[in-house]
Amino acid sequence: MSRIKTCVSLYSLQDEYLNKRMSFADIMRYVKSLGTEGIEILPDQMLKGSPHISDEVLNEWNALVAETGLKPVIADVFLNTNLYKNRKLTRRECIDLLIDEIIQANRLGIHLIRLVSMVPYWVIEPLLPYCEKYDVAIAIEIHAGMAFDVAETNAFIEEVKRLNSPYAGLVIDTGIFCRKLPRVVRNYEMSIGTSEGIFDYVDSLFAQGTDLHQVLKKSGGQYPQELKKEMKSEHDQISVPLLDGYENYPFEVLDGLIPYIKHFHLKMFEMTEEGPEYSMDYKALLTYLHGKGYDGYVATEYEGNRFTLAGQPMKEKQQVAANQKYIQECLKEIQG
């Protein structure tokens, strides 16, 4: 029996926050008003001084958590190995930075950290004693364009399996389960000059049950002739490499990974007036997870904001609300 719980990544409301239409407190209260159970936070975006926040910031955080009753589920962490112009961070420096994030998560009452895609596998084992001490698990994000055919991702997965610790796992981003190319991507790219034929070609791949990423993988990175003939402008040369970041895996790719999955990002580009998201079948995914007995959170992660057409208003609040409404309805039907 599954117990799938709802969550919102505050990344979804970043433009509201950046442009000061909503404060951090406004966002927390808004998410609570949607009937959501938990939140996912980017500490370095919304908590001043992160990862070394002051007691004042911590007290403000604790007060908001108490007021809203939202569960602080997961902290999103980035490992910037390129802080210096002349070298990458050493292993010791990388590990020390992540120890700071683990300690901060503990202070915030958060027991899970999402490591951004491509964090090296060798951080896991030296971090486990700190994860255990502070009761904070670490999990790498499996993200479209950097998923199961990427050596670094597979190395992390294999290390998670080898160590078999409750403090190391995976976060699955549903951008790997696109069933169509997001319509907002097509509309935005065409508005800045990208040729329509490119999107017709990519749409045809999804209709065949595949995607551009898989086609390029099989061809050794060479663009097929059908695509080349549609690439007619400078915009086309820039846009096409970005379109292999929408993948079309079957849900069954997760069959052997369920014990290691700590969290899901429900990547969302456009909720439709009809109810579902345009490019993904959340209901089918939630049904699959229910059948597997998944006991964790699924977090709304809105990224359609970056494809807002010039002169059009941001719709972060509306899109997040529509997503939560749909997900909660699906879960009520699936789980009872």
Image (cartoon, rainbow, N blue to C red):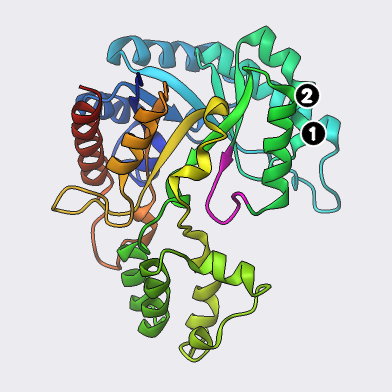
Task: Give, as a single range, the part of the protein colored magenta.
Answer: 141-148
Residue at 36% across / 22% down in the picture?
38
Residue at 69% across / 29% down in the picture?
160
Residue 23 figure quarter: top left
Residue at 45% across / 34% down in the picture?
264
Image quadrant where one finds the N terminus: top left
Q: Residues within 10 Å of mark 2 (few under 14, many from 20)?
A: some
Residue 117 picture location, percent across and down: 62, 44
As for residue 147 lying within the magenta part, the answer is yes
Residue 183 figure quarter: bottom left
User: Which amino acid does the dot numbered 2 rest on?
Assistant: Glu
For mark 2, what is the residue? 125
Q: Could you tell me if residue 8 is visible in this image? A: yes
Residue 290 picture location, percent across and down: 35, 28
User: Which amino acid does the dot numbered 1 rest on?
Assistant: Trp
Q: In the drawing, does residue 273 fall left or right of residue 286? A: left
| Rendered view: 159 above or below 83 | above
- Give SS at disc 2: helix
Q: Are marks 2 and 1 in contact (CB under 8 Å)?
A: yes
